[in-house]
Every structure is written in C-alpha cells, then in structure tokens.
Image (cartoon, rainbow, N blue to C red):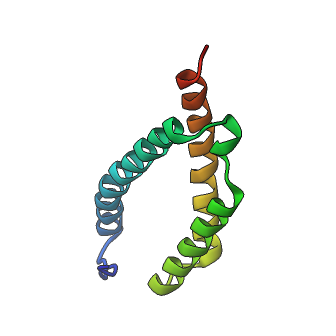
Amino acid sequence: MPKAVKCNSLQDVRDNIDRLDAVIVPLLAERIQYVLQAAQFKETRGDVRIPPRIEFIVDRVRSFAQEEGMDPDMAESIYRHIMEESIAREEVRWDVINED
C-alpha cells in the first residue's frame, strides 16, 4: 500500500484526506452490500451475529493495522463499529427476507 506523502500545507493534508475518503466510502458501501447478501444464506436471525467470525475479523484487522504502522487498537475500534452497524442492517434485511 502507498504511504502518506509529506504535505507542505494544511490544504495539502485536507486534499489528501478528501482523496482517501473518496476511495474509502465506496469500499465501505461495497462491504455492506456483501453483508446484506449474507442474510439470505442464514437460517435464523441468530445466525446474523457470529462471535467467532467477529473475532476472526478483528484479529485480521489488527494484524493488517500492525503491518501498516497503524495503532491496532484504533483499527479494532473502527472495525467493531463497522461490524455492529453491519449486523444491525443485516438483521433488518434478514427480517424482510423471512417475513411470513
């Protein structure tokens, strides 16, 4: 992955943050689309939250963060929030798919 370049002004910093946000948000949108698809493959609403899968993802993210020189605790916090939001939306999707 590319590393941050040295900025010469606050505007350079802001421009780079804006550039990255334009990449990050579409990736998050793609991620949630996969999460929502998962609802159709789960037999029960309880199958939406799988603690071992959550911990697997957290462990991977912490490792990725460490490799990139990012604070693993920060990465874990961000991802736990993403996963909680994703689970909430997947539960709603599961309910819609399984209405009687």
Task: Residue at the far front: name it.
Answer: 43
Q: Quadrant of residue 42?
A: top right
**Residue sitting at x 67%, y 35%:** 45
Q: Nearer the viewer, residue 88 or 6?
A: 88
User: Height in image: 84 above or below 17?
Assistant: above
Q: Position of residue 79 (x, y in %)?
A: 58, 60
Q: Residue at x 57, y 36 (%)?
A: 89
In what quadrant of the picture does the C terminus appear?
top right
Q: Residue at 42% of width from left, 46% of height from top?
A: 34
Instruction: Report whether 26 appears left or right of 97.
Output: left
Residue at figure coordinates x 67%, y 53% from the top left: 50
Taking 84 as reference, is 66 left or right?
Answer: left
For the residue pair 97 and 85, the one nearer the viewer reads as 97
Q: Position of residue 69 (x, y in %)?
A: 49, 85
Quadrant in the picture for residue 54: bottom right
Indicate the quadrant where residue 5 lies.
bottom left
Image spot of residue 77 (x, y percent)? 64, 63
Above or below 18: residue 63:
below
